[in-house]
Amino acid sequence: MIDRVYHLWLAGTLASQVGNAVLFFALGWAASAEGGTAAALVLTAVTLPRTLLMLLGGVAGDRLGARRVMIVCDALMVAVAVALGAVALAWGTPLPILVAAALVVGTVDAFYLPSSGSMPRRLVDDSRLSRAVALKQSGTQVVALVGGPIGGALVALGGFAVAAWFDAATFAVVLVVLVAIRPRYDVPPPPSQESVLQSARDGLRVAVRTPALGPALLLVAGAAGFILPTTTLLVPLLARDHGWTAATAGLVVGAQGAGLILATLVVARRGSAKRPGVASAAGLLLAAAGQAGLVAPGAALVAAVLVGVGSGVFVANLAPLLLGAAPRTHLARIQALVGVGQSAALVVTNNVLGMVAEVASAGAAVLWCAVALAACAAGGLVTPALRRLTLHQAEAAGR
């Protein structure tokens, strides 16, 4: 049975994720009124500081304490969102204000996300870690499905200011939760004379030297680069090539989300596989098969479900392995490396797949993506450190 404190923290965290999803929708919607270039600039203003500063955010979480860092970030987000709503009410949403807000949000995320990602291991006994992580992933996917519609409704009813104040309210909820709880399995931050950059390099050293951590991080980057573009890039491109309506494209995206939720809920109920590295690679192979099926219009819904199930199997098995194998003194830094790897991979693959779609076709880009994802899965299966590793061995390495 997962501790009640974890459920309390998870409820607060998911509430803040809904608030963030609403704010991101509001930022994108307001920026889109200035044109596509302006919208891209605002999205980049969120992503860029998040990518550049996330390793420093991981260092802060490990050296100052993850809970303390999150409390400070939550308090900042409450203040920023309240002020942003007031500014929007008084002066509207000119592009400079939107870009400045996006930069602040991205910077706060860079420090918040590594600490938040490490919290399951600080709140839950190692024997229940896989169930706790799977439950978090399924909740996050539900937020991804409902966040946009909620944001659209709030912006339509009350405008940008209401969306910003809603975000502030959700961060106030998780702030109260964090002040109230105490992580049962946390360790005090060790005293260190290292500089921030030395601590960041130490995180990289640990990732390389800890068995299976390095290959697992590479596998996460590969999966992110070839799974995440499915909903954001490939399905919209396929929809235009096949003449689908926006509603049909949304149904395909929803089918992938439903498959992911189903898979992670099953793992949350039963626990991860005895050999999570093998199960993760199998999940990638299933997702690759689903991606290949997307090019057949009549099979797109079923194929999207397969992509989602495969993605869920991958995440629900590999995420606990990454958390379990990381030393408790480096939890936030390892989570930061996960985030940086995902962001860096997306920067490359989104552009490459977009060029393939433009030069050849959307179907060709999807098939290239499926082949690359299958290659990632094969790489995981032939890597002894991942193929032979059990979750128990990973947890023992991380103690």
Image: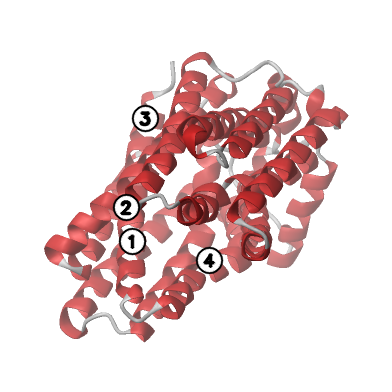
Q: Which is nearer the eye, 125 or 301?
A: 301
Q: Is residue 243 above or below residue 384?
A: below
The residue singled out by tag 1 in the image is: 25
- Left or right, 288 with respect to 232, comes to right
Q: Are marks 1 and 2 in contact (CB under 8 Å)?
A: yes
Residue 190 visible, this orientation: no
Q: Amino acid at mark 3?
A: His
Q: Amino acid at mark 2?
A: Gly
Q: How many C-alpha atoms fall within 10 Å of the one at disc 2: few (<14), some, or many (≥20)?
A: some
Comes first in the chain, label 2 or label 4: 4
- Left or right, 194 with respect to 65, comes to right
Comes first in the chain, label 4 or label 3: 3
Label 1 to label 2, Cα distance in Å?
6 Å
State the quadrant of the C terminus: top right
Q: For the residues carrying marks 1 and 4, which lies nearer the camera in this image?
A: 1
Q: Which label sits on residue 47?
A: 4
Q: Is residue 155 above or below residue 339?
A: below
Q: Position of residue 9 (x, y in %)?
A: 38, 37
Q: Which is nearer the eye, 157 or 193?
A: 157
Comes first in the chain, label 1 or label 2: 1
Q: Position of residue 81 (x, y in %)?
A: 29, 67
Q: For the residues carrying marks 2 and 4, which lies nearer the camera in this image?
A: 2
Q: Which label sits on residue 7?
A: 3
The residue singled out by tag 2 in the image is: 148
Q: Which label sits on residue 33?
A: none
Label 3 to label 1, Cα distance in Å?
27 Å
Label 4 to label 3, Cα distance in Å?
29 Å
Q: Position of residue 162 (x, y in %)?
A: 18, 64
